[in-house]
Image (cartoon, rainbow, N blue to C red):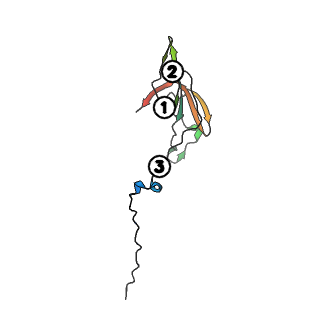
Amino acid sequence: MTTATKARPKLKIHPRPLTQLKEYRMTTATKPRPKLKIYPLEDRVVILPADEGETMRGSLHIPDTAKEKPTRGQVLAVGPGRIEKGERVKIDVGVGDTVLYAKYSGAPYQAGDDELIIVKASDILARIG
């Protein structure tokens, strides 16, 4: 009995590392920010609520209408601050911060497919590190 061996194809190794090749670079999958420009007034803050994961309780699926409102989100725009005794008081949060806000506060605003929330700075409870 003779054993027939197949010739393995040689792997081509590129002279440059994969990190230097544009077609092999990886990007993180993030939700794109809305392209609408919103300029909040006074001490208002525009927040993009964080997506809640798919909710499953054992084998039961919880529908969207039964889910709780999110209380965490990313700050998209910040107003100049309120005027108190003739001077402007700046807001403690900035664009890009992740914040916790009160559950039923703010005014919802639909921007394309995203629902934004415009809240007062006093309704923001904490900034997450």
Mark toward the start of the polypeptide (2 vs 1): 2
Measuring 58% from the left and 30% from the top, which residue is drawn there? 38
Picture quadrant where residue 7 is located: bottom left
Q: Are marks 3 and 1 in contact (CB under 8 Å)?
A: no
Mark sitting on residue 81: 2
Among all residues in the image, which is located at the extreme bottom? Answer: 1
Q: Which residue is mark 1?
A: 95
Residue 54 in picture, x, y percent from top left:
52, 44
What amino acid is labelled 2 in the image? Gly
Mark toward the start of the polypeptide (3 vs 1): 3
Task: Please determine whether, in this image, residue 81 is positioned above or below residue 28.
Answer: above
Mark sitting on residue 70: none
Measuring 46% from the left and 54% from the top, which residue is drawn there? 22
Picture quadrant where residue 111 is located: top right
Q: CA distance from mark 2 to mark 1?
A: 14 Å
Among all residues in the image, which is located at the extreme front? Answer: 15
What amino acid is labelled 3 in the image? Thr
Badge 1: residue crowd in 10 Å (few <14, some 14–19, many ≥20): few
Mark toward the start of the polypeptide (2 vs 3): 3
Q: Which residue is mark 3?
A: 27
Task: Please determine whether, in this image, residue 120 is positioned above or below residue 37.
Answer: above
What amino acid is labelled 1 in the image? Val
